[in-house]
Amino acid sequence: MTGTILNIITIIIGSTLGMIFGSRFPDRIRKTVIAGLGLFTAAIGIQMFLKTENAIIVLGSILIGGILGEWWKIEEKLNRFGGYLEQQLTKNSTHQDESIQGENSQRERFMRGFLTSSLLFCVGPMTILGSIQDGLTGDYRLLATKAVLDGFASLAFASSLGIGVLFSIITVFIVQGGLSMLAAQAAAIITEPMMNEMTAAGGLLLMGLAISSLLEIKTIRVGNFLPALIIAPLIVALLSFLGY
């Protein structure tokens, strides 16, 4: 839960600064910070990958996981889910602006900030991978990196959407904390070799995330590779059962 707590703290700080200082922070600073985080995230991904004891297992899990992810269209469904929430929010927003003024208008602004930021902070590969890693091993470095990103994002959102962004910490606590707790329960049945290969597969996903979303070098549908986090330990378990 350490990573989730750090994430909540950065959102509180970012939202507060956003409401106080607004849009005074230059865009070039934001871009430079995100690029630095991209380099750092890629470095962590490489470090995680080096934990593998059998690179072929990682390759197999990535390929099988990628095929399953494309078949199930995981990233597309995540994006569709986000688009649906945004569409519903915009629809409600338009309706309220036409018929309700004053206090209800403030309520609409609050809900827009809350839902938009909750969606951004809780839907994505980094949330899932970071929460699992934190729950299984106690390694919260990935969630700490995400926390910095969310801090800057909450600053930008709060400057225009107000205090609703701050209350997204409730969603972050429930989603990330819940994933970490579930992962902690699974730790009892996951052996060290299974953990190493899952960590290595996660490292590749992390590098893909850095290349695609943070450094913007090449678009990669990282979300479709998420099944690899389950496939890797399953391959290890299968090989162990077969005596390899």
Image (spheres, rainbow, N blue to C red):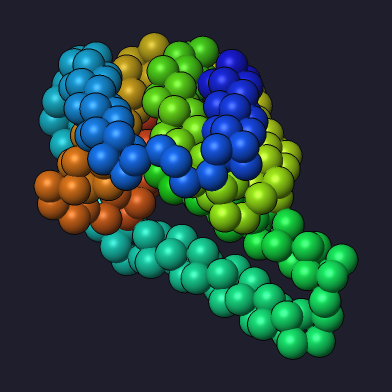
10 sits left or right of 59 in the view: right
Foreground: 106 or 240?
A: 106
Foreground: 137 or 213?
A: 213
Residue sitting at x 32%, y 44%: 27
Residue sitting at x 32%, y 18%: 196
36 sits left or right of 131 in the view: left
Where is residue 156 drawn, in percent x and y?
A: 49, 46
Residue sitting at x 62%, y 41%: 19
Count of marks, rendered view: 0
Relative height, residue 138 to residue 217 (above, below): above
Q: Quadrant of residue 101?
A: bottom right
Quarter holding the C terminus is: top left
Q: Quadrant of residue 52?
A: top left
Relative height, residue 205 to residue 135 (above, below): below
Q: Is residue 34 visible?
A: no
29 sits left or right of 154 in the view: left
Foreground: 169 or 110?
A: 110
Where is residue 214 drawn, in percent x and y?
A: 26, 41
Quarter holding the N terminus is: top right
Farthest residue, direction right: 103
Residue sitting at x 70%, y 46%: 163
Where is residue 134 drawn, in percent x and y?
A: 51, 21
